[in-house]
Amino acid sequence: MITFMLPLALLAAADIMIWRGWVRRKCRVVRRVYLVQIALPWLLLLWLVGFMIVRKEPWLDVERTMRMMLWVVWLFVLLAAGKIVYFIFWLTGRLLHRPKAWRAAGAAAGIALAAAMICGATRGRDHIEVRQVEIASGKLPASFDGARIAFFADLHLGNLMSQQRFLDSLVALTNGLQPDVVCFGGDMVNLSSDELTPSVVETLGRIRAKHGVFTVLGNHDLGIYGDSVAKPFALNVIEILNAYGRMGWTPLVNESVYISDGADSIAISGVGYPVSERHKEGMAGGIYDADPQVAYRGLPDSTFNITLSHTPVSWPEDLPCADLTLSGHTHSMQMKFTIFGASFSPARLRYKRWSGLYRDGERTLYINDGLGYVMFPMRIGTRPELTLITLRRR
C-alpha cells in the first residue's frame, strides 16, 4: 500500500508546487489548461479503480477492456512521472540552495522520461531482439556439444496489440535460428484460454525444431486472474494443454522427457508454478502446482538436465536436478537501464534474480525478459527477447 500511495502523494505535491510556483501567475488560458492536466491523471485513476471493481461482471468485454486498461495506465504514468521527477529535482535544489540549476535539470529529466516512455510504447514493445548465450557443462554428452536452444517466455497473448504481425515475426525469427530444441517458459495467455484462437494455434504451430517444442505453465495460464466462475481453473488449463497438442508442442506438467542424439540423451523437465494459498481452491486438487519431486522422479544424477520453471524464485534450492534452468516471469518489469555493463530495473527490488545469467557452482539459471507485457504496453531498455542458447561440453 505504501508503494502505491507514495507516488500519488508525490504527484499531489508536484501539482501544488507547480501551480503555486508558476501557473497561478500565468494567464487564464494557461491556468485552465493546467487544471485539466491536473484532473486527467486522477480521472484515469478513478477509471482504473472502477475497472478493478467490475472486471468480473458478465456484461463486460474483459479482454478488450484489459487492453484499454494497459493504455490508461501508460497515459497515467506518462502524465504523472514527469511531474514527480521535476518535483524531486526541485525539492533537492531547495535543500541544496541551488533551485534554478536543479529546476532546469528536473525539466530535462522529465522530458527525457516522457520521450523514453513514448519510444517504449512504440518500437520498444514489439521489436524482438535475439540474444545469444553459451552455456558450458562437463555433464553435457558429446553429441549435444553445440546444440542450439531457442527460448522465449511470457507472450500474454490477450495484451498484444499487433498480434498477428508480432507472432509472424516470432515464428520467422525462431525458425531462422535453426534450433535443435525450442522451449517456452510459460504465460502464453493473459487471462483465459480463449486467447489461444485458431489463428494463434496455426501460427505458433509453424515453429519447428529438431527435437521439438517444450513448454510449461505460467501463473497467468492457470486462469487465476480471470473469471474462475465462468471458466474454472482446471478447465482453463485443460484447454491450454489441448491447444498445445494441436500446435505440436509438448507441455511438461511436473514431468521429464528424454531427447536423444545417437547414443546420447539429455532430459528436459518442466515444473508447475508455485500457486499461492489464496488461489489453490478450484485448482483440481492442486495437480498443476509446482512439484519438482514428481518432475524429477527416476531421473539419473548423471543425466544432463534442462528444467523449465516459469518463475526463477524456485532456483536453485527447489530444483536439485537442474543443470540449466530456463525461466521468465519477471519481464525485468519492462524497464531496464544499463550503464557501463551494470543493469538496474525495478525488478531488482522484488526479485533476487530477475534477468540474464546466474550461476551456482556448476548449475546455471537463465531468465528471459519475456516477449509480451502486463500493466502497461511499454518496454524501456528491455525489448521483447528471443534467446538462442548454445550448449557446450566442457
Image: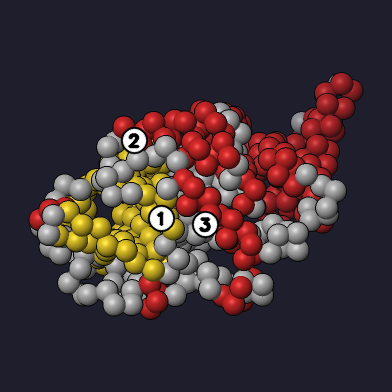
CB under 8 Å between discs 2 and 1: no
Compute the Cα span from label 2 to label 1.
17 Å
Compute the Cα span from label 1 to label 3.
9 Å
Q: Looking at the picture, which amino acid does disc 3 mark?
A: Leu
Residue 177 figure quarter: top left
Q: Which residue bears the numbered disc 1?
A: 250
Residue 285 visible in the picture: yes
> Which of 388/143 is in front?
143
Residue at the image position 14 percent from the left and 60 percent from the top:
264
Q: How packed is label 1: few (under 14 Cα within 10 Å), some, or many (20 or more)?
A: some
Q: Which residue bears the numbered disc 3?
A: 241
Residue 37 figure quarter: top right
Q: From the viewer's perspective, is 79 left or right of 35?
A: left
Q: From the viewer's perspective, is 383 left or right of 70?
A: left
Residue at the image position 52 percent from the left and 35 percent from the top:
125
Does residue 163 lie above or below 210 as drawn? Answer: above
Extreme residue toward the front, this view: 246
Point out residue 255 in the picture as x, y percentages from the top left corner. 39, 68
Earlier in the chain: of badge 2 and badge 3, it is 2
CB under 8 Å between discs 1 and 3: no
Q: Which mark is residue 175?
A: 2
Point out residue 225 in the picture as x, y percentages from the top left corner. 66, 59
Q: Secondary structure at mark 3?
A: helix
